[in-house]
Image (cartoon, coloured by chain):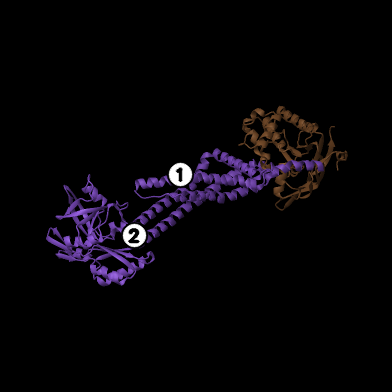
Amino acid sequence: MNERVAEHRSRSAPRRSAPAAAADWTRLRKTVAVGLKSIYSHGLRSLLTVLGIVIGVAAVIAMLAVSEGASFEAQEQFRQLGSNNIILKSVKPPEAEASGVAGFRQPSVVYGLTYQDIETIRQTIPAVSNVIPSRIIKKSVRHLGNTVNTDVVGTTVDYPVSRNYSLRQGRFFSAEEVEEQTNVVVLSDEVASALFPVTDPVGDSIRIDGNYYKIVGIMEPEAYSNLGQSQAGSSNAAPSRIFIPITAARYRFGETIMRQTSGGMESETVELHEAIIQVQGQDVVEDIGRIVEQIMQRRHARIDYAIEVPMALLRQAEESALRDQIVAGAIAGISLLVGGIGIMNIMLASVTERTREIGIRRALGAKKKDIVLQFLVEAVILSGVGGLIGVVLGVLIPVIISVFWDMTTIVTVGAPLLAFTISALIGVAFGIYPSMRAADMDPVEALRHE
Amino acid sequence: MTDGAVAAGIEVVAGVRDIRKTYHMGALAVEVLHGISLDFFRGDYISIMGPSGCGKSTLMNILGCLDQPTSGKYYLGDEDTSQMADNDLSAIRGARLGFIFQSYNLIQQLTVVENIELPLFYQGVPEEQSRRTAIELATRVGLESRLDHKPFELSGGQQQRVAIARALSNDPLIILADEPTGNLDSKSGAEILNLFDELHQQGKTLIMVTHSDELAERSERAIRLRDGLVESDERTRR
């Protein structure tokens, strides 16, 4: 008897010492193969089971893509407006408009930012490093037979730097040119191509109100028409602009703009239309914004100005993006939870159906953990397949959204990865209970099961 | 101890000592086995007979390590299995026992070869080796042309032959057969019994539960149970 046992031991010994990793790998591979077979044999049922996971995963990816896109747009605008900037704008006060409607038309309206305003801001707030004023006047601009209606922006040398604008060609005007009220102009890309469809504009001239201005440079086209500018004030809503020295603008066009209306002449006097206040240190921008507001309140009886802090806009955008993400996460979470319950339900049914198989496997030497592994693998395959389908849909939906609703959507590498991982984890979480139930069956009872 | 045990030089492969089994049905406790002691020798060809409810199935479940006695000891090889944990029982089933069931109990999604190598899979035997063993055994039971068939494509007799090959795959100490010909027509049944005779001649230890006198006559040792006790245990042929 001992000899028999010894023989047995020696025979089983090399089995145990055989490369365990390779054996485990084979076992897992075979377990996966069995799981796949079982899922495949109930094709429709399996598909319906994973629907919850599919929807959940697709929702996670699509919603993340939309909110990522929105946040990208906000950041892009923010980048253009400048992170250190506070933007002050002149706004025609509502009283002036209202009185006009009521018939007591004031022939002349005086409102808006003044040179004194920006001087006060510059001098009272040490954190303000620079203030770039501009005047914005609508004009017809001509070259040969071509005419374009555009905003003429009179400003200083630092304007492109403060706004993160760059030049496509040539240069911006210089400090001397501002000093000397020189008639030089920098065109936007749109104006340049409208006025000079074939020839190179740099070095050539354009005409505004009978005066000629020499073209020294052309701006890079803007990637995004930005939120901040299109919102506030009609004065600079046009995307195409040309830039001249602020001194030249003041000298050539004056501060009063005359308009021909049905009732006669009407005039508007505005010293400055816009000022970009550059602040040292991003973290104080919002505080400085409030101080600027206080100064302006003290200096102006009417609200004939608007203050825009891009940093605050970005923060609002990010807050709303975060809210969106929380809502999206909750919806996706509920969907994944429902999906997980679906998987658990079907796994329980599968365990009951295969009671006898479990008994056979147990009789043939399967340990409890082998049975757990078998059903767990099956649950994970189910949720994993659901996850994969979900990833495909989740990547397609943002594409459809951006085509049909003209929204920026961005699918990051992380989102599908995250969603897929969550789906696999759900397979584990909701597969554990059915698997344990399978493993805990009494082998004798299981073998007797019809 | 039984008379056969005295025979010198015969190796005991398994033995039960005063095993009892009590089932609890609610408040009611029913003792099914009232103390059974038996020795099984290497090369034994045993039939266990007895009327329904005599405890045959319970004894077989205990011998198969699928169930444990309430008291008493069961030695398999040199190990006492009566107090073993579930994991060790699984291991010992996989390593030392072969099962043949009345209703074949093949796994329907697996092919003939895959069914045969299933015990080896749970033993962690490398795939090439288990595949080779399975093909050898399939050939031995005459199913070399059906390797990749699924069980439902086979006749009852063929399915039972697959089950026999499966029971042999781990080279067990004991092969346990529960009514192996119960679901078969007489011709297929005879084929299965011929196969059993062959295994016996090769020195395998076979224990089968049966109602059939014909089977009992072919075996060399007939154990009769009645009311949870051994009624008789005799050598039928030499």
Q: Position of residue B206 (x, y in %)?
A: 77, 36
Residue at disc 1, secondary structure: helix
Residue A106's place in the image compared with A212, above or below, is below
Q: Amino acid at mark 1?
A: Val
Residue position for label 1: A392
- Quadrant holding the C terminus of chain A: top right
Q: Amino acid at mark 2?
A: Gly
Nearest the viewer among A203 and A195 is: A203
Nearest the viewer among A34 and A305 is: A305
Mark 2 belongs to chain: A
Mark 1 Cα shell of 10 Å, populated few (<14), some (14-19), many (≥20): some
Residue position for label 2: A82
Find the distance from the CA under tag 1 to the CA under tag 2. Answer: 37 Å
Q: Position of residue A62 (x, y in %)?
A: 42, 49
Question: Do tags 1 and 2 sit on the same chain?
Answer: yes
- Quadrant holding the N terminus of chain A: top right
Res A240 seen here: no
Mark 2 Cα shell of 10 Å, populated few (<14), some (14-19), many (≥20): many
Q: Position of residue A322 (x, y in %)?
A: 42, 58
Q: Where, by quadrant of the figure, is residue A246 drawn?
A: bottom left
Question: Which residue corresponds to the image point at 71% horizontal and 45% vertical from the top-left?
Answer: B91
Mark 1 belongs to chain: A
Residue at disc 2, secondary structure: loop
Toward the front, the furthest residue is A176
| Disc with the residue nearer the chain's start (1 vs 2) | 2
Chain coloured purple in this rendering: A
Q: Position of residue A45 (x, y in %)?
A: 52, 41
Res B15 seen here: yes
Q: Where, by quadrant of the figure, is residue A175 drawn?
A: bottom left
Chain coloured brown in this rendering: B
